[in-house]
Image (cartoon, rainbow, N blue to C red):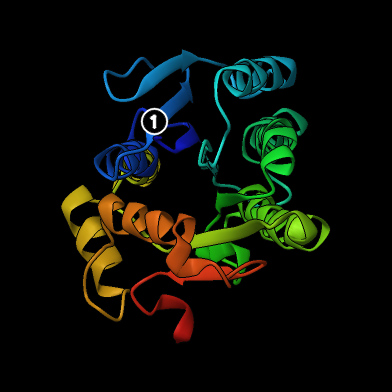
Amino acid sequence: MKKTCVITGGSSGIGLSCVEAFLNDGYDVFNLDLLPSEFGRFCECDITDLNKVRTTIADIAKQQKIDVLVSNAGIHFSGTIETTSDSDFNRVFDINVKGTYAAIQAVLPSMKENQSGSIILIASDQALIAKQNSFAYNLSKAALASMAKTTALDYAKYNIRSNALCPGTIETPLYHNAINSYVAKSGANKEEVHKEEQSLQPLGRLGQPKEVADFALFLASDKASFITGSLQVIDGGYTAQ
């Protein structure tokens, strides 16, 4: 019988690569996103609508047991604490934190019933370090790290594992949108900014979404059966500096 994986934000970037990786490994994959996708079983879902997240996942659980959750949906936002408005702050937390909170809540009944499960939160290297002009985003990713660890401790007795993947700079649409926004505001040359970002990484390049997806697939597998409550860094050495 196929295993089942639920992925939030699986229509682009790291999420799309995760959908493809789990499909290729034989999983039945449900993708909760607003942007339609031809990959996996697409479920239109606004991650900020917590009741919609819960009911969508509950409907999946009625059909089959849920083995894996990859909570990936998220947005980037640049700003200091002074330049972050209430609405900006709320939007970042509604998507990056509250959506994950609702998704974890929703998969737990199925995983508890089956006495197994793997929860993987896509956090960031900013769960471990601070970066300038990144107040709300940094805070939201630190919250995901905490969520992964507390969930791991609370549900270990059910053989449910919970870990956070902490990618560094990955070349995704989110990355390019952030660069485009910076270029529009600063007037900098995009190609030069991109090269500078590459040079900041000890390995001299940006990470690729597939590399993160392959790591998520490993964390979901029996090969990672003794790994829980961990923050797994995949950042080309950036946080080792």
**Which residue is situated farthest in the front direction here?**
1
Instruction: Tell me the residue at 74%/43% (across/down).
Output: 112
**Which residue is situated farthest in the left direction here?**
191
Kind of residue sitting beneath label 1: Asp
Residue 183 in the figure: left or right of residue 240:
left
- Image quarter where the C terminus lies is bottom left
Residue 123 in the figure: left or right of residue 113:
left
**Residue 156, position in %: x, y?**
75, 61
**Residue 32, position in %: x, y?**
50, 23
Relative to 108, residue 237 above or below: below
Residue nearest the viewer, comparing 30 with 225? 225
- Kindly tell me whether residue 55 is visible in this rendering: yes
Which of the 4 quarters of the picture holds residue 99?
Answer: top right
Relative to 165, residue 16 above or below: above
Q: Which residue is under mark 1?
A: 28
Residue nearest the viewer, comparing 68 with 148? 68
**Which residue is situated farthest in the bottom direction here?**
241
Which of the 4 quarters of the picture holds residue 98?
Answer: top right
- Kindly tell me whether residue 173 is visible in this rendering: no
Residue nearest the viewer, comparing 155 with 212? 155
**Residue 134, position in %: x, y?**
59, 54
Relative to 5, residue 50 above or below: above
**Residue 121, position in %: x, y?**
57, 50
Instruction: Tell me the residue at 44%/58% (across/down).
Output: 221
Which of the 4 quarters of the picture holds residue 61?
Answer: top right
Residue nearest the viewer, comparing 147 with 6? 6
Instruction: Tell me the residue at 54%/46% (across/down).
Output: 78
